[in-house]
Image (cartoon, coloured by chain):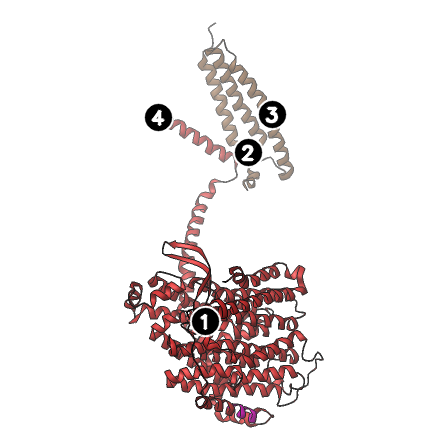
Chain colours: A red, B brown
Amino acid sequence: MFNNINIALVPLLPLASSILLGLFGRKYIKNAAGIIGTAALLVSAVLSAYIAYEYFFVAGKIDNVYQPIIAMQYNWLQFTPSLSINLGIIIDPISVMMMVVVTFVSLMVHVFSLGYMKGEERYATYYAYLSLFTFSMLGLVISTNIFQTYMFWELVGVSSYLLIGYYFQKPSAVSAAKKAFIVTRFADLGFLIGILILAFHAETLDFQTLIQRLTDANSTQFASSASSTFLGVSALTWGLTLVFMGGAGKSAMFPLHVWLPDAMEGPTPVSALIHAATMVVAGVYLVARLFPIFSFDGAALTVVTYVGAFSALFAAIIACTQTDIKRVLAYSTMSQIGFMMFALGVSGYGGENGLGYMAAMFHLFTHAFFKSLLFLGAGAVIHLVHSNDMNDMGGLRKLMPITHISFLIACFAIAGIPPFAGFFSKEEILLSAFHANTLVYGVALLTSGLTAFYMFRLYFSIFWQKDTEVHDSHGEGPWAMKLPLIILGALALLAGFVPFSSLVTADGMPLETHIDIAFSAAPVLLAAAGILLAMRLYKKANETPAKIALALGGLYHAAYRKFYIDEVYAFVTKKIIFNLIGRPAAWFDKHIVDGLMNAMASVTAAFAGLIKGLQSGKVQQYALYFFGGIVTLTILIIYWW
Amino acid sequence: MSEIPLTHILFVSTALFFIGMYGLFTRRNMITMLMAVELMLNSVNINFVAFNKYLFPENLDGVFFTIFIITIAAAEAAVAIAIIINLYRSHHSIDVEDATEMKW
């Protein structure tokens, strides 16, 4: 059976290295910090791979169904006999899968950073933050309790904040970090209220009990949550929708996506880890974790579907116009997470209906590899060119062959070209959407065409088009940077062949899937068309893209300005909230609250002014008061008694 | 010749006390104020001696107290004069009204 210490070590090792590097890194450890952090994570990754092997192939299956295992349960806060907050470790298909993804991608990023961040002044601090993030993310995925999830959720947000603001000398990085923190914090407010609603009705915070009570139509808890309504919507739907709001904030779903593109101010390996592969899929993971309840409540699931589908298309359109390569990747991340979200949204719970769930998890898995590869590749390019703007790049295929090949593999993977990893997962998503909802299927098909187009626009702009003068002589970078690219490139090529459908499903039972060539033809052809179009437009520098942009006019401009969402937020916060709530509140504070305090102070001062004459400093006056007092007392004592 | 009654002596001491008090309240010169305080102390001494003699002639408690007070008055005079000298050094004056900022 499982050795529980091994499982606990997976998150605890990064925590230990984070504390060690955070406390002693800058002064004593310095350049060894990278090796220490990487070594701790290597052990973590090996352990989690071992756990995954144990779970999936040895011990996890009972009667052909993968059973969740509570590997550790510690009663932390006991409120009432029935309600407590526990800290624990749950081992089930999705948590094991996430554990492997997080430790593996984090390991790759640690290794890559050995080269990329070399010579940085706050090198040890960087590794401390990176390890802290890894710990928080692992804690999040193994939570047994929704409140434990929430705590790690916030920890993840904090480490993301720290890492985005790593270059705190740059004002743009500071404001991006604040923006990310505030936007996700705002979303987490919804998450917290959602938790409270669900916990209030289900009378528990434990995931398994929560799911069991709220999916049983005969239980009193279900009756109470389904019957109490607010604005005509049941408490269950409200709770789930608000929990999804938290997930949408972390996963950068429309309209809470505004922080993600700005978060690219952080160091590029950080973007690869946090803002591509792990943290941003926390929302998907959360919905998957609560999926049995979601699948019981059609309304909340519909919200998930349409938010996901809209975000996917919306982000893909913006990605076609951006010139900052990291921003293109950020929007493509948002678009791919949209895919995962609507795949969950169109999914049912058991058997064949659970295809969407499986597909979302599968896409999460493959996406983690090829998207972190894309970001690391972009990092290598930025390392060489010292610019984020694709206009400053071109012709780099000769200078950086390994980056070029791995980037190309990742582009094929995300475009969904067989036999690369993205093809398999995207096929499942499209298939599940096709069976459930034609509109969503259409959006998904269009988006996957667009995905191929903008990814290859990026690819050709970086590696082909014109020739760039590169002044640096350090070439492609050290092996620490090339090795993760090669490993991830191999995975982006092969991850699709993992028999995922028999491992991770909604109900734990293996699912039969097959690739239907007739069905696959449409998306693959569309993707190929997108690639050819991008090749025609961007392989050699020419005037056509500018002409097309001009012809599209307002539409292009709107997409280039990200559909003015940032401006809308600025308008809403600065003009409406600031004027209607901020200013009156400030006025109230200044005049009423402060006024009350000032009035009290001035009354005291006036009274003091009245009596301060008594203390003149004249000794004789004091003696006179003293004498007067004695006389008065004497008279009182003689005539009163 | 008949004995002097107690009331006469008490009258003298009371008069001395209030003369001293008047001096303390009205004089601004600190040396004079010190003298006024001495007057008040001596009026108390007279009281002690008188009561001792008239009420408990077999005891000497009042006389002892008087001797104590004279000793303490001497010490007090030394301290007061030291204060006055220091005040004069810093203020070039021994007028109490000039020392009102001492309240801070």
Mark 2 and 3 residues: CB-CB less than 8 Å, in contact?
A: no
Q: Report, in whole angstroms, how far the alpha carbon at label 2 lies from the one at label 1.
A: 90 Å
Q: Chain of mark 1?
A: A
Q: Which mark is residue A110?
A: none
Q: Which residues are magenta?
A: A530-537
The relative height of residue B89 versus residue A416 in the rendered view (above or below) is above
Disc 3 crowd rating (10 Å Cα; few below 14, some 14-19, many 20+) is few
Q: Residue furthest top?
A: B1
The quarter of the image holding the C terminus of chain A is: top left
**Residue at the image position 60 percent from the left and 35 percent from the top:** B94
Give amino acid for label 2. Answer: Arg
Can marks 1 and 3 be said to lie on one chain?
Answer: no
Q: Nearer the viewer, mark 2 or mark 1?
A: 1
Give amino acid for label 1. Answer: Tyr
Q: Earlier in the sequence, mark 2 or mark 3?
A: 2
Q: Chain of mark 2?
A: B
| x and y, in percent, of residue A53 in the image | 52, 69
Q: Report, in whole angstroms, how far the alpha carbon at label 4 lies from the one at label 1.
A: 89 Å
Question: Between A583 and A43, which is closer to the camera in this rendering?
Answer: A43
| x and y, in percent, of residue A129 in the image | 57, 65
Mark 1 and 3 residues: CB-CB less than 8 Å, in contact?
A: no
Q: Residue furthest right?
A: A473
Mark 4 and 1 residues: CB-CB less than 8 Å, in contact?
A: no
Left or right for A594, reference A481: left
Q: Which residue is mark 2?
A: B28
Q: Which residue is mark 3?
A: B75
